[in-house]
Image (spheres, rainbow, N blue to C red):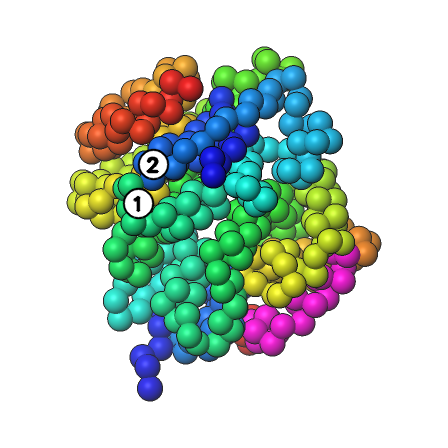
């Protein structure tokens, strides 16, 4: 049996959960190495050796040590191309490019405002950090405009990059899940017909349900 | 088939143009004036629904997001021109890692600086001085990490020039040029040497003049 790959960081982290969902889709065995962020473990010298920006996740297999969740996911999809969901990153260069287009849209347009809202509404209260109402309002406005574009796209196409679930959709699960389930802004998704339909479908993936379970038990 | 590239005057588009130049791929540029709001015209939004540049057309195929475009061409023409992806899956992994670092850690800060220092007046809003200060501080911390990395490695992903280094060219050119923050690069010995190396590549010299 193959040595499990190592993922550093808590399943509660959005970026860590992106990697876990990908590993589950690809049937790649993994072990989670805990990093206690409440004790500042991610800023200590030992951890900074494998992730110099002091962020989670980090990743190791027998040939490489990597960081940045989306690059870890791309590496896993390439290295384990024949395992699990073989179409996760497309089966030809044009499909792959369309997937990358929407992964970039996630990283550059969806991620920042949704991440800011998730932080302000779900995490700040738990960390006793005062909420910034201005930031909440500004980011909600930004996110609405982005989601209008997604709504149109998902009226033309079942999933973001085409007819099949791909890494492009998966990449939205971490922030989307907190937005829908841990804040009062879930209506931004559910009130849009196509977006709501897409959200129900992608959040129902076995891989994502397992990640949600892992979060509950961590 | 000549690739059509929209919005050549802007930094994100130059990321694509310098990649095409490295790969020896012919392109044709079509201007889009963001100050005049041409990116909000319905015809443009049909191509790029977020209203951003760049977007490319290659025959019937349309693609947007500069980092998606450069990945596509770097892979499609891997054995033509400069190989920007590394030779093995592991080298590719490193290229992807540092390309994501650029997208997630470097870009947000340098983009804020670009928008507020270079474009605020033209776009009709007051520059946010607090944001400028904070973005510069955050960028300095990122550059410190780059300094350490580049003290052990000639380029970001290893001993070869890749998409990861290339991706930094356009906005860093703004930083050392019109933003007058060259000191941020020059005060860091290895970042400085790396910048001199990558910015003197013929592909960048050609594209930065467009």
Instruction: Estimate the x, y position of residue A69 in percent, counting from the top left.
Output: 44, 57
Is residue A127 visible in the rendered image? The answer is no
Left/right of residue B184 with respect to residue A169 in the rendered view: left
> Where in the figure is residue B135, as x and y percent of width and height?
46, 30
Most distant residue in the front direction: B1
Mark 2 is surrounded, within 10 Å at the Cα level, by few (under 14), some (14 to 19) or many (20 or more) other residues, namely some
- Disc ID at residue B80: 1
Quick check: marks 1 and 2 in contact, CB under 8 Å?
A: yes
Identify whether B48 is placed above or below B10. below
User: Is B118 colored magenta in this rendering?
Assistant: no
Which residue is nearer to you in this view: A201 or B26? B26
> Which residue occupies 43% across, 59% down?
A74
Residue in the image at 68% along x and 43% along y: A146
Image position of A10 (left or right of A129): left
Q: Residue B155 at what x, y percent from top left?
A: 24, 41
Name the quadrant containing residue B180: top left
Q: Are marks 1 and 2 on the same chain?
A: yes
Of all chains, the one bearing label 2 is B
Rendered image quadrant of residue B185: top left
Q: Count residues near mark 1 (Cα–Cα under 10 Å), then give few for <14, some for 14-19, many for 20+.
A: few
Residue B29 can be seen in this image: yes
Nearest to the observer: residue B25 or residue A64 = B25
Q: Chain of mark 1?
A: B
Q: List the residue tagged with mark 2.
A: B24
Which labelled disc corresponds to residue B26? none
Magenta region: which residues? Answer: A194-211
């Amino acid at each position: 049996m193959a040595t499990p790959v190592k993922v550093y960081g808590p399943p509660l982290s959005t970026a860590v959960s992106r990697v876990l969902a990908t590993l589950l889709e690809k049937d790649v065995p993994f072990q989670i190495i805990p990093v206690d962020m409440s004790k500042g473990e991610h800023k200590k010298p030992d951890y900074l050796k494998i992730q110099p920006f002091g962020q989670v996740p980090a990743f190791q297999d027998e040939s490489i040590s990597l960081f940045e969740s989306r690059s870890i996911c791309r590496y896993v999809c390439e290295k384990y191309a024949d395992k699990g969901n073989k179409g996760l990153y497309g089966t030809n260069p044009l499909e792959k490019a369309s997937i990358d287009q929407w992964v970039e849209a996630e990283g550059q347009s969806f991620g920042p405002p949704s991440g800011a809202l998730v932080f302000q509404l779900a995490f700040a209260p738990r960390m006793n950090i005062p909420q910034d109402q201005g930031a909440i309002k500004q980011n909600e406005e930004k996110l609405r405009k982005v989601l209008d574009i997604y709504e149109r796209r998902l009226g033309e196409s079942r999933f973001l990059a085409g007819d099949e679930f791909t890494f492009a959709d998966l990449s939205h699960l971490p922030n989307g899940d907190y937005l829908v389930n841990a804040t009062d802004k879930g209506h931004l998704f559910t009130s849009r017909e196509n977006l709501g339909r897409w959200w129900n479908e992608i959040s129902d993936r076995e891989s994502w349900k397992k990640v949600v379970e892992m979060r509950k038990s961590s | 088939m000549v690739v059509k590239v929209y919005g050549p005057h802007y930094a994100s588009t130059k990321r694509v143009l310098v990649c095409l130049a490295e790969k020896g791929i012919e392109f044709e540029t079509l201007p889009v004036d963001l100050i005049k709001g041409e990116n909000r015209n319905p015809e443009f939004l049909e191509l790029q629904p977020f209203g951003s540049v760049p977007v490319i057309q290659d025959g019937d195929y349309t693609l947007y997001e500069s980092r998606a475009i450069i990945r596509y061409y770097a892979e499609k023409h891997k054995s033509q021109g400069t190989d920007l992806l590394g030779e093995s899956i592991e080298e590719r992994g490193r290229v992807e890692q540092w390309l994501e670092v650029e997208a997630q850690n470097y870009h947000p800060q340098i983009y804020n600086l670009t928008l507020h220092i270079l474009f605020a007046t033209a776009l009709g809003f007051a520059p946010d001085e607090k944001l400028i200060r904070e973005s510069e501080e955050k960028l300095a911390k990122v550059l410190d990490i780059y300094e350490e990395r580049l003290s052990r490695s000639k380029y970001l992903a290893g001993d070869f020039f890749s998409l990861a280094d290339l991706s930094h060219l356009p906005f860093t050119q703004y930083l050392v040029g019109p933003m007058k923050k060259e000191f941020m690069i020059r005060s860091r010995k290895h970042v400085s040497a790396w910048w001199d190396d990558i910015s003197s590549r013929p592909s960048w010299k050609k594209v930065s003049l467009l």
